Image (cartoon, rainbow, N blue to C red):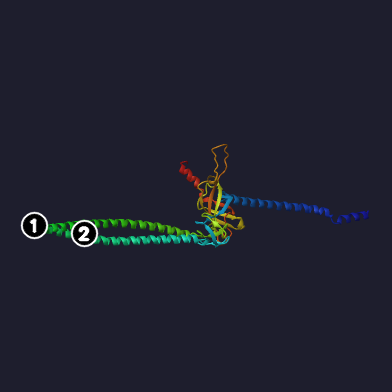
Amino acid sequence: MNAQMRDRQVESDAPAPPGGASVVDKGASRGRLSARARVLLIAIGLAAFVIGGVWGAHWWLVGRFIESTDDAYLKADSVTIAPKVSGYIDEVYVTDNQSVPAGAPLVRLDSRHYQAALDQLTAMSAARKADIAREEADLSLQRANIAQARAQLEGAKANESYALAQIRRYEPLVSSGAESGERLAELRNAHNQAAATLEVDKAALESAERQIGSTQAQILQARAQLEAAAASAESGRLDDEDTVVKSSIAGRVGDRTVRIGQYVQPGTRLMTIVPVQDIYLEANFKETQIGLMRVGQPATIHIDALSGADLHGTVASFAPGTGSEFALLPPQNATGNFTKIVQRVPVRIHVDAKEEARKVLVPGLSVTVKVDTRSGREAPKRIESASGHG
């Protein structure tokens, strides 16, 4: 009995098995984990609420006024270079993609034919000047002849008057018998000759005076011929100058197709000058997006060629019609079945970019653009007020 009681005492004094202790510890751990999970979920919920509130506030104040499109491309007002005269290409001064300033020579045509024509026209102008000089000299000579004819006329008038006076003086003497009739006949003959000479001198003076008008008309004609020759010479000079084709704007050479020895006609496309320094953006916004859009609003521009860097711009102008209005074949909606399609309006946006970024910007690059239209949010109220609706 004593032995059995000792064995039971030993068993009661022995430590508890490990299984019982783990059950208690697991229960406590579950309690602590569920408390932490609740705190974490509450924190996540609060964070989501705050983030959602911030996002919602941002959308309400800013986001709902942002209009974006990826139907946008960089453009530049390129100039097609073409000659004004025909001829063979002698020299090409530029290479592909070369930058050129305004007025730089690009191509030179064979100018020998135009130089010869210019020399001929210049000689014609000189001949017309010589004709004018000769006619003016003839005019001076005719004026001198007129002066001489007037002097002769005055002398003839004096002789005629003297002969008439002699006749009147001798007529009484002949009537009284103091002088013979023969003397009176001589005086009358002299008077007749003086009168005839007077008429001849009058006719000569009149002819000389009329010749003045003819010579002056010839001078006017010669001057008109000189002006025509000078105009032809100027045209020839311009043709000779046009054998050197120059760039009308500053930019870079693109699409160069001209080669030395090639024969070109006026208007033949030689190359294109692209003003990359004046590049702009044309974005095609849906008609439902431009209601609040106004000139001067800021824009954010993302270009794939400049990954990670956004540019800024400003709305510059709106096209006076949708893109379909300026299409080669505009849609005719007045016939057949009609399906409404949202139209797009081209919007020009000025690009603000530094020199380093402009080296990458070329026409044709696709762009994603966002326009902040917050400055136009009062527009609907002004429209309603102007239309008379309260």
Q: CA distance from mark 2 to mark 1?
A: 31 Å
Residue shown at 53% from the left, 53% from the top: 349
- Judge by depth and name the residue closer to the eye, 192 or 209: 192
In percent of width and height, residue 219 lies at 34, 58
In percent of width and height, residue 100 lies at 53, 62
* Residue bearing mark 1: 174
Badge 1 crowding class, 10 Å Cα cut-off, few under 14, some 14 to 19, many 20 or more, is some
Q: Secondary structure at mark 2?
A: helix
Residue shown at 14% from the left, 57% from the top: 188
Q: Amino acid at mark 2?
A: Leu
- Judge by depth and name the residue closer to the eye, 154 or 289: 154
- Image check: 130 left or right of 32? left
* Residue bearing mark 2: 153
Q: Secondary structure at mark 1?
A: helix
Residue shown at 37% from the left, 56% from the top: 224
Can you tell which mark lies on residue 70? none
